[in-house]
Amino acid sequence: MISIVQATERDCQSIADIGKTAVEESHRGSSSVEVMTEFLERNYNPEAIREELHDSHNIYYIIQYNGESAGFSKIVLNDSHPDIGVANVTKLDRIYLRKEFYGQKLGLQLLNFNINLAKDNGQSGMWLYAWIGNNRAIDFYRKAGFMVIGSHNYYVTETHFDVSHRMFLSFSER
Ligand SMILES: CC(C)(COP(=O)(O)OP(=O)(O)OC[C@H]1O[C@@H](n2cnc3c(N)ncnc32)[C@H](O)[C@@H]1OP(=O)(O)O)[C@@H](O)C(=O)NCCC(=O)NCCS
């Protein structure tokens, strides 16, 4: 039984735990252990997530499998990028599952949910960054119709960046 529900303060710990593990696993090799640890401790602790949830621009959803949190997503509506040229596009900022749920189409269900939510809010497309070494995620986005439209140096800390694809899905072609 799968359900997708809006995240609340009660989900802070679980979002932090899922994010920490999934980022570490999917970005292994992108930076040193020290850089990764600094990034994860700063961004994936319950207090940081609580602050994120308090910002009404951030739309977090949890995907549950038999009542257990299997993953989460974060989108920001009307978050344009100069390369895209239209204002009404959504940034998919985070989508992370627990490892035991990979490959079971839960990611696809959560992505499609967010695409429909964005469309219902008058958006014309969705974009994201994906580290060039994260093949599973890049394949996943390509299968869903996203195209690489540019490259971006994503600063993980003040001194280290990951070279990332900028990917875009136009809703008019779907
Ligand atoms: C990326 C992620 C959200 C995808 O969710 P998922 O539920 O595992 O993906 P799905 O089961 O919906 O699979 C959809 C497609 O992804 C791709 N995919 C799945 N497993 C893969 C693997 N091991 N290697 C390469 N591609 C894979 C396939 O193209 C698959 O389609 P197919 O089953 O028809 O071949 C999930 O794996 C995840 O949380 N990964 C770690 C965190 C992460 O990298 N997030 C994105 C940051 S940019």
Image (spheres, helix red, strand yellow):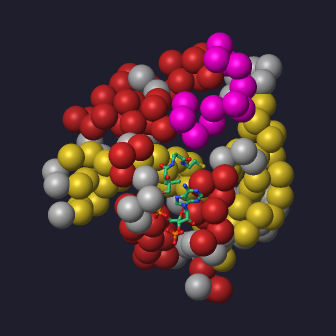
Q: Can residue 27 be seen from the camera position used here?
A: yes
Residue placed most toward the observer, 21 or 4: 21
Q: Is residue 45 left or right of residue 87?
A: left
Q: Is residue 172 left or right of residue 45?
A: right
| Residue 95, percent from left and from top | 49, 50
Q: Quadrant of residue 39?
A: top right
| Residue 11, percent from left and from top | 27, 37
In percent of the image, x 63 and y 85: which residue is there? 172
Disc count in the image? 0
Highlighted magenta segment, given as a residue range:
23-35
In percent of the image, x 71 and y 61: which residue is there? 167
Residue placed most toward the observer, 9 or 111: 111
Whether 10 is drawn above or below 93: the answer is above
Q: Quadrant of residue 66?
A: bottom left
The quadrant of the rendering that contains the N terminus is bottom left
Q: Quadrant of residue 79?
A: bottom right
| Residue 94, percent from left and from top | 52, 47
As drawn, which residue projects farthest toward the bottom?
173
Q: Can residue 74 be seen from the camera position used here?
A: no
Whether 106 is drawn above or below 42: the answer is below
Whether 157 is drawn above or below 112: the answer is above
| Residue 138, percent from left and from top | 66, 58
In percent of the image, x 66 and y 47: which residue is there? 134
Q: Is residue 146 left or right of residue 61?
A: right
Whether 22 is drawn above or below 7: the answer is above
In percent of the image, x 37 and y 30: which residue is there? 17
Q: Is residue 133 magenta?
A: no
Q: Is residue 34 left or right of residue 113?
A: right
The quadrant of the rendering that contains the C terminus is bottom right
